[in-house]
Amino acid sequence: MEKLKAIASCFMLKGEVTEISPLGNGLINDTYRVCTSEGESYVLQRVNNAIFKDVELLQHNIECVTSHIRAKLQEAGEKDLDRKVLEFIPLKDSPRTYWTDGETYWRVSAFIKDSVTVETVNPEYSYHAGKAFGNFQAMLADIPEQLGETIPDFHNMELRARQLREAVEADAAGRLAEEEVRVILAEIERHIDDMCLAERLHREGKLPKRICHCDTKVSNMLFDKEGNVLCVIDLDTVMPSFIFSDFGDFLRTAANKVAEDCPEIDKVAFDMDIFRSFAKGYLESASVFLTPVEKENLPYAAALFPFMQAVRFFADYINGDTYYKTSYPEHNLVRTRNQMALFRSVMAHMDEMAAFCRE
């Protein structure tokens, strides 16, 4: 803890560091709560530069986004701003908002008091999530700064299609000999070009890139103790993307009635109650900037993300499980079956989703 105290003390904190304790259970970054002699609390976090290789770009994105949102909230006359937008603390000897020793990277943000996160996924929280993430995009629709991609091609379906075809060509683990693998591959190939619609629309000038969160889930929002949304958090993946990223990625996990690696494929189903709640909240806040092309393709976004994830799991299985952690030999194949079942369930609801969005 002494090393952590030394790192935290490099930032412009109010008071001396008195206590540091682990905070949360994040899978990517190490996070701690820092308390000071002035009664203030902060969040100290190690940025995982194995995943986010350009930390300077990442922090630039976050600073641009949070300062723009803060200005928007001030303009709207919002009260209690320090609880409604994240604030990152600069170093004592520099305006930079991260510390590094050349190998590890650390940052500090203000701790938002009397806030809670939730893991519950139900229609009520899905509505809150839709409204919050739609509002997040809406506030950033006119951001003047140029932001970069913290993970290049993160949600690029054409790239995932190429990676799958390269995996098939190499057949590194010899798994194309399995009949089920060939059956799944044939099904994926029937849909893969249609699922690359977003990239085609973008090249044709019909689909803009927006500033998106790119990791939309209920747990990435802070609530006050009355259940009101305070702000969106976990901004490392904020970058230019299609609005489908935030819409489809939430539904891929939230609207699947089982976990993504559940082997009981007959239980996989797309939950339309979750869809309707999330879409209602999202359209209430995002409609102010969405184009007709973006609105009419929201059902496509719901189908795209389970399909894309199936392609990624499947390519990894063919490659011999070199990317995703697996617990048993067929884990990636089970994940593929699960996501393809979810994709089929979504496709069965396309007309219903389209009618709901129009209404």
Image (tube, rainbow, N blue to C red):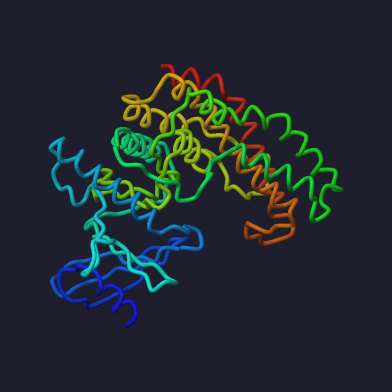
Q: Residue at x 54, y 30 (%)?
A: 198
Q: Is residue 199 left or right of residue 173?
A: left
Q: Position of residue 152 (x, y in %)?
A: 51, 47
Toward which corner of the image does residue 26 lie, by quadrant?
bottom left
Q: Is residue 84 left or right of residue 146?
A: left
Front one among 126 and 232: 232
Q: Residue at x 55, y 41 (%)?
A: 257
**Quadrant of image for the N terminus:** bottom left
Front one among 211 and 129: 211
Judge whether 249 appears above or below 326 on screen: above
Q: Position of residue 3 (x, y in %)?
A: 34, 80
Judge whether 347 appears above or below 26 on screen: above
Q: Residue at x 48, y 22 (%)?
A: 206
Q: Residue at x 59, y 30 (%)?
A: 346
Looking at the image, how many numbered discs can be counted on the residues?
0
Judge whether 197 appears above or below 79 on screen: above
Q: Position of residue 238 (x, y in %)?
A: 40, 46
Toward which corner of the image does residue 310 lie, by quadrant?
top right
**Quadrant of image for the C terminus:** top left
Toward which corner of the image does residue 46 lie, by quadrant?
bottom left
Q: Is residue 16 left or right of residue 234?
A: left
Q: Is residue 114 left or right of residue 254?
A: left
Q: Which residue is situated farthest in the bottom direction here? A: 2
Judge whether 175 appears above or below 35 on screen: above
Q: Position of residue 81 (x, y in %)?
A: 17, 47
